[in-house]
């Protein structure tokens, strides 16, 4: 799963609002074309490779995001 970043590179992602705005912008521009299954699988692959470098709180949040992606993908089947 590859996501085209384009003009998003170099933007300020220092705040929650900036990150949410980026999510919204991807949606508006039609760059949210990754399926829930692909997003869940991509997150799982990255999480597995980064697990030992994550702090506990970060890991908990990312696992919750993954669980939400999995649940939403499963509900669409």
Image (spheres, grey):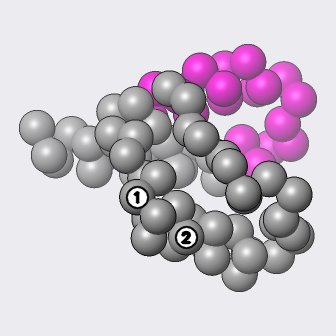
Other-residue count near label 2 (Cα within 10 Å), few / some / many at <14 / 14–19 / ≥20: some
Instruction: Name the outermost residue toward the left.
Output: 77
Left or right relative to 73: residue 52: right
**What residue appears at the point 87 percent right and 57 percent down from the top-left corner?**
10
Disc number for residue 53 = none
**What residue appears at the point 44 percent right and 35 percent down from the top-left corner?**
40
Question: Magenta residues, as a range?
Answer: 40-60
* Above or below 23: residue 36: above
* Above or below 53: residue 12: below
- Element on which disc 1 rests: loop
Number of numbered callouts drawn: 2
Please identify the quadrant where the C terminus is shown.
Answer: top left
Disc number for residue 30 = 1
Disc number for residue 25 = 2
Q: Nearer the viewer, residue 17 or 48?
A: 17
Q: Mark 2 to mark 1: distance in Å?
A: 8 Å
Q: Nearer the viewer, residue 29 or 44?
A: 29
Left or right relative to 72: residue 28: right
Left or right relative to 20: residue 17: right
Q: Position of residue 73 (x, y in %)?
A: 26, 42
Q: Position of residue 61 (x, y in %)?
A: 65, 53
- The reply to whether the magenta stretch includes residue 61 is no
- Element on which disc 2 rests: helix
**Counting residues from the N terminus, which is met first, the one under dot 2 or under dot 1?**
2
Q: Position of residue 56 (x, y in %)?
A: 80, 44
Q: Position of residue 74 (x, y in %)?
A: 21, 39
Residue 4 in sight here = yes
Instruction: Name the outermost residue toward the front.
Output: 7
């Amino acid at each position: 799963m590859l996501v085209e970043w384009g003009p998003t590179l170099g933007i300020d992602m220092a705040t929650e609002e900036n990150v949410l705005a980026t999510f919204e912008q991807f949606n508006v521009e039609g760059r949210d074309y990754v399926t829930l299954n692909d997003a869940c699988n991509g997150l799982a692959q990255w999480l597995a490779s980064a697990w030992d470098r994550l702090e506990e709180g970060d890991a908990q949040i990312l696992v919750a995001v993954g669980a939400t992606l999995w649940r939403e993908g499963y509900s669409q089947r």
